[in-house]
Image (cartoon, grey):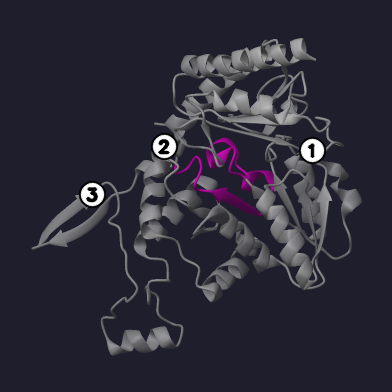
């Protein structure tokens, strides 16, 4: 049994009925608002902030705590807290560590809602926000100010999949007392030990790989010891808490994470390699492929790859042609998010000043279907696209 599996599978949960122990593999789901105290003394201790137990439903019920402890162990962090969604986790963590007059840096390929929150909300309250190149490394020093408070990374970046030189960034940040945060959802803590690379705060959209079934909304944040107390205090003040039912599902998902990621990785790489030789495809954007510009960084820092990657076409197809390609697919669902058992597809154009030159990126979430079936489905779409483009050429 490997280390990651051992960390997750060593749980047993007890209850007692009529004097007999009830032992289950998974924890019971605690759901409630009022929590009863054993005594007046306990009530008084809770009122005075000295009670060591759970005082109310917002105080992280046992199911949530069991999930947080398991994930914290996997992340090798000091403290983990769960949130109602990934973006909620991101927003609350940014609010924890910023105040008026601060300056923060975000990678330009960050998850879109993260950038929107920083530009539309944090700037409104006097936090200066600037953006870093998608493949940033030691040149991060050129972007720092005297009041730079934190650096927010995402590696690989959303949609464009650049890899940061994380140790180079964290070394410089640590010298200046700057907090580093990483959205580690793509790799999960199984394939990227963010805190061991110097990151202070690792963020997960639990809705994705950790859940694995696209049936819950949950986020999680793991913090090192240096910044833990500030995080704990803010979490308590905001009375954040997560759905006990979603925490139970997430804890269940952790137990199969290593198996599912192995299959996602295998299927995605086999499909990516086939797309590399397809006559319609220009570039396949997958960090685990040798052709990726930061492949050497992926090899150095990551223990594996997952099921999300992108590709571009050689031709600049019209929206109508792209619609024909995507709408003709049978196995790929059209939808946001990723990390679940079902394969998904989205498409979008990104910065013209990027290495991709403003091309449309087709983003694939490779699920747990047979890769041969997924390739056949994509080929069906390519055929529909070729026929449509050929008809357009003949009529012009």
In the foreground, 285 or 314? 314
Residue 287 visible here: no
Which residue does the image show at 60% across and 42% down from the upper left?
Answer: 193
**Element class at badge 1:** loop
Which residue does the image show at 84% across and 43% down from the upper left?
Answer: 138
Residue 355, which numbered label?
none
User: With 304 as the anchor, is 314 left or right in this view?
Assistant: right
Quadrant of the image for the C terminus? top right
Real-space Cα distance between discs 3 and 2? 18 Å
Tell me the residue that label 3 is attached to: 24
Mark 2 neighbour density, 10 Å: few (under 14) some (14–19) many (20 or more): some
102 to 272, vertically: above or below: below
298 to 273, vertically: above or below: below
Residue 323 visible here: yes
235 to 134, vertically: above or below: below
Quadrant of the image for the N terminus? top left
Which residue does the image show at 66% across and 53% down from the upper left?
Answer: 113
Q: Quadrant of the rendered structure where residue 354 is?
A: top right
Q: Which residues lie in the magenta part?
A: 184-211
User: For the view shown, which residue lies furthest in the front direction?
Assistant: 395
Mark 3 and mark 2 lie on one chain; the one further toward the N terminus is 2
* Residue 206 x, y percent position in the rendering: 50, 48
Real-space Cα distance between discs 1 and 2? 32 Å
Tell me the residue that label 2 is attached to: 5
Q: Quadrant of the rendered structure where residue 60 is?
A: bottom left
- Residue 394 forms part of the magenta stretch: no
Which residue does the image show at 72% across and 54% down from the upper left?
Answer: 115
* Residue 239 x, y percent position in the rendering: 50, 72
* Residue 132 x, y percent position in the rendering: 82, 47
Tell me the residue that label 1 is attached to: 135
């Amino acid at each position: 049994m490997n280390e990651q599996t051992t960390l997750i599978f060593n749980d047993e949960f007890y209850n007692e009925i009529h004097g007999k122990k009830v032992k289950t593999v998974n924890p019971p789901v605690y759901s409630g608002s009022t929590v009863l105290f054993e005594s007046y003394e306990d009530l008084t201790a809770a009122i005075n902030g000295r009670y060591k137990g759970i005082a109310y439903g917002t105080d992280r019920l046992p199911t949530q705590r069991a999930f947080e402890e398991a994930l914290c162990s996997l992340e090798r962090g000091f403290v983990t807290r769960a949130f109602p969604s990934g973006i909620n986790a991101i927003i609350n963590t940014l609010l924890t560590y910023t105040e008026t007059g601060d300056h923060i840096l975000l990678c330009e390929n960050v998850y879109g809602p993260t950038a929107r929150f920083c530009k539309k909300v944090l700037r409104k309250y006097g936090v200066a926000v600037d953006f870093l190149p998608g493949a940033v490394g030691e040149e991060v020093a050129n972007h720092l100010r005297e009041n730079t408070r934190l650096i927010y990374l995402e590696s690989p970046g959303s949609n464009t999949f650049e890899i940061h030189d994380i140790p180079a960034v964290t070394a410089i940040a640590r010298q200046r007392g700057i907090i580093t945060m990483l959205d580690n959802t793509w790799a999960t803590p199984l394939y990227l030990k963010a805190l061991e690379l110097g990151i202070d705060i690792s963020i997960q959209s639990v809705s994705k790989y950790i859940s694995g079934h696209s049936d819950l909304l949950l986020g999680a944040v793991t913090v090192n010891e240096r910044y833990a107390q500030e995080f704990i205090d803010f979490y308590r003040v905001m009375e954040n808490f997560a759905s006990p039912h979603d925490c139970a599902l997430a804890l269940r998902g952790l137990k199969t994470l290593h198996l599912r990621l192995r299959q996602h990785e295998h299927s995605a790489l086999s499909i990516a390699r086939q797309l590399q030789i397809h006559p319609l495809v220009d570039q396949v954007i997958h960090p685990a492929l040798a052709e990726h510009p930061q492949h050497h960084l992926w090899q150095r820092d990551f223990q594996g790859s997952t099921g999300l990657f992108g590709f571009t076409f050689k031709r600049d197809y019209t929206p109508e042609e792209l619609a024909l390609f995507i709408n003709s697919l049978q196995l790929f669902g059209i939808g946001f998010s990723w990390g679940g058992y079902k394969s998904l597809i989205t498409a979008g154009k990104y910065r013209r000043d990027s290495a991709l030159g403003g091309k449309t990126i087709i983003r694939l979430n490779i699920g747990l279907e047979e890769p041969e079936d997924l390739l056949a489905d994509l080929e069906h779409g390519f055929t529909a696209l070729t026929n449509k483009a050929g008809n357009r050429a003949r009529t012009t």
